Amino acid sequence: MSRRKQNDIEQNDTGITDFKSLLKKQGYSLAGRHSAVKTCLWLRRSIKDEGECYKSVFYGIHSHRCLQMTPTLMCNQKCLHCWRPTEVDVPMPVGWDSPVEIVGSSIESQRKLISGFGGSAPLERWQEGNDPKHVAISLSGEPTLFPHLHELVDEFNKQGFTTFVVSNGTVPEMIAKINPSQLYMSLDAPERETYEKVCLPKSLSLWDNILRSLEILKSKETRTVIRITLIKGVNMFNSKGFAELIKIAEPDYIEVKAYMHLGFSRKRLPREAMPSHSEVMEFSKELAEHLDYKIAGDVEVSRVVLLSKDGSVSHLM
């Protein structure tokens, strides 16, 4: 581990007085008063025409035109596998930016973040990157804690974006309101006891909220996805228990993904907690049998397997 990364982690033991400085050091660009944008590894590869992320393989998303952002840095869980600095509590902002302001400032932040690629990337791809067409509302924090998330999704939709929202499912009222192109819900445990060990919720009632969100997912007209992050020795067991919960939601797709030993999660989990792709595939096959779903695809480099009801998947773009 580099000394710089080690210093970032060690700051959590002594207290971080300037959270914004930490975010900037981690590659975030703040957008407005409480939102943030960050480019991912696959955007940086895609803009150079060196590969695409698994969302491109599964759903047809162009990684270099993907805007990854969050409308709030707050979260009500402290998941062991999260690569963000969950040890730091984010204060409630004084006032909320409007959805129109957030969309504009997020696009502006994205353009600043990729400005340095102008001389090293193919011109056409760099120009396309400056005109993002997909937004992943999934970064640091739980987006459903933003009280105007449904309006933010609608604004992105109005401006021609495909919208992915990734939620932990702990705010069922907002899950019912939002209508993104694709709605993800993380499911990181097959039952309450494991959930409390893995996600360290700030309130023990959040498991009940997750169960309600699973019920709401079943009635959504938008495309729905359950995402499971597998951690060896922690939650990688009881595929039948996961299946029983997933049956409540009847999602269009299920993503089964390996925990990756990155960022601040390295302080909480050993490298051995990462399952191999073959282990993820084996668990996925067990899950598929319990649910009568089929394997629809997999991407080995990302250690992720996709399940669907009929073994197929349709692209969004």
Image (cartoon, rainbow, N blue to C red):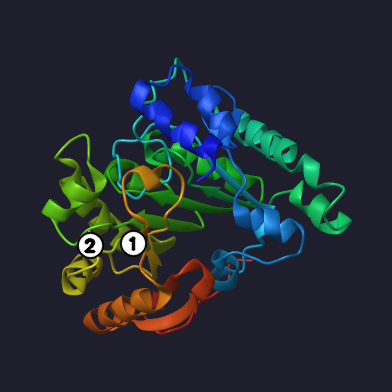
Q: Residue furthest left?
A: 193
Q: Is residue 97 visible?
A: no
Q: Which residue is mark 1?
A: 272
Q: Is residue 15 visible?
A: yes
Q: x and y percent of residue 21 in the render?
A: 55, 23
Q: Which mark is residue 120?
A: none
Question: Which mark is in front, 1 or 2?
Answer: 1
Q: x and y percent of residue 31 in the render?
A: 60, 29
In the picture, measured across the screen, residue 6 lies left or right of residue 92, that is right
Q: Residue at x 40, y 57 (%)?
A: 184
In the rendered image, which quarter is residue 107 located in?
Answer: top right
In the rendered image, which quarter is residue 268 located in?
Answer: top left
Residue 80 or residue 209, whichever sits in front: 80
Q: Name the amino acid, label 1.
A: Glu
Q: x and y percent of residue 197 in the render?
A: 18, 48
Give the secondary structure at mark 1.
helix
Q: x and y percent of residue 20 in the render?
A: 52, 23
- Distance between the Cα atoms at labels 1 and 2? 9 Å
How crowded is the residue under tag 1: few (<14 C-alpha within 10 Å), some, or many (20+)? few
Q: Which residue is mark 2?
A: 233
The image shows residue 135, relative to residue 31, as above or below, that is: below
In the picture, measured across the screen, residue 289 lies left or right of residue 175, that is left
Q: Contact, CB < 8 Å: mark 1 with mark 2?
A: yes
